[in-house]
Structures are given as structure tokens and as C-alpha cells.
Amino acid sequence: MKQIIAIIRPEKFPEVKKALTDAGVKGMTIREVKGRGNQKGIKLQSRGGSYEIEFLDKIEIMVVVHSDMAQKVMDVILASARTDRGPGDGKIFVLPVDEVIRIRTGEKNDDSL
Ligand SMILES: Nc1ncnc2c1ncn2[C@@H]1O[C@H](COP(=O)(O)OP(=O)(O)OP(=O)(O)O)[C@@H](O)[C@H]1O
Ligand SMILES: [Mg+2]
């Protein structure tokens, strides 16, 4: 099993959610996060001069899937989260998962997803 953590632009979330759902993903956890990438934030101009926002709003999507679904999920996120607006589209992290248990039934691992 694999844990896939995607940090994406908030405005892309509806599209990514639909693409994941269409690909058969059911359970997922999301949260509003703040982050920065290689650009270490962005510089903005206002009448009072320029200022920097160090951490930008992002959405984190966390999904655990069967290993044979992981590549599909990554591809779906890539296709739906990408924009042509330059830096800041986000990142995908993939981690191995040792164990999953459905609390209601005690089912484990592949049966519990
Ligand atoms: N190395 C990292 N570790 C943890 N979180 C990260 C890392 N890189 C990016 N993130 C998270 O992903 C968000 C989006 O990153 P971002 O798309 O700006 O990555 P990038 O590497 O700077 O690529 P780009 O050049 O396309 O902007 C960040 O705001 C942060 O929340
Ligand atoms: Mg960046």
C-alpha cells in the first residue's frame, strides 16, 4: 500500500477531487495548509512598496491506495493539478504504508481500503 500526499493550488482542488473520484478513489483526507517551495514565497507590489508572503495557502490531499493503484493516482493528480501559470503547482510525495486497519470491523491492509 502507498500513501500519496499531494500539495496543490486550492483553486485546483475541485478538479483534482473529481479526477480522483472518477479514477475510483473513495477515501481521502484533505486539509488546508500553508507552504513554500523553491521560490521561498512570493513578492507582491502595493502602493506602499513591495512586500513578501513567505507561506502560501495550499490544499493537502492524503490518500492511501493499493500499490497497483498508486501510479494511476499520481498520473491523475499530475494531469488535473497542473496549470500553465508558472511556479507553484505543487508536489506529490509517495510513501510506503505498513499497515491499515478499519476500526469498525478490524479488517486489515488490502481488505480495509
Ligand atoms: N521539499 C518540500 N518539502 C515539503 N513540502 C514542500 C516541498 N516543496 C514544496 N512543498 C510544498 O508544496 C507546495 C507547492 O510547492 P511548489 O509547487 O512551489 O514547489 P516548487 O518545488 O517550488 O516547484 P515550482 O518551481 O513549480 O514552484 C509548497 O507551498 C509546500 O507546501
Ligand atoms: Mg515553487
Image (cartoon, rainbow, N blue to C red):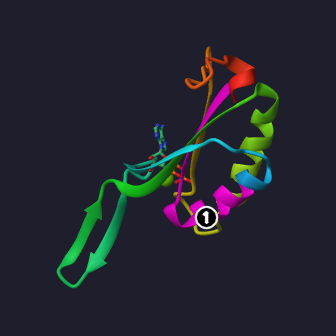
| Element class at badge 1 | helix
Q: Position of residue 99 (x, y in %)?
A: 61, 15
Query: Which residue is pictured at 58% across the width and 69% down the height?
Result: 85
Depth check: give the residue in front, 25 or 40.
25
Q: Is residue 70 magenta?
A: no
Q: Is residue 43 left or right of residue 69?
A: left
Depth check: give the residue in front, 113 or 1.
113
Where does label 1 land, which residue?
14
Query: Which residue is pictured at 25% across the width and 80% down the height?
Result: 46
Depth check: give the residue in front, 43 or 83.
83
Q: Is residue 111 above or below residue 35?
A: above
Q: Position of residue 82 (x, y in %)?
A: 66, 60
Type of amino acid at the residue the image marks with label 1? Pro
Q: Is residue 61 left or right of residue 26?
A: left
Res. 97 image quadrant:
top right
Q: Quadrant of the C terminus?
A: top right
Q: Is residue 103 above or below residue 77?
A: above
Range drawn in magenta: 1-19
- Can residue 82 be seen from the camera position used here? no
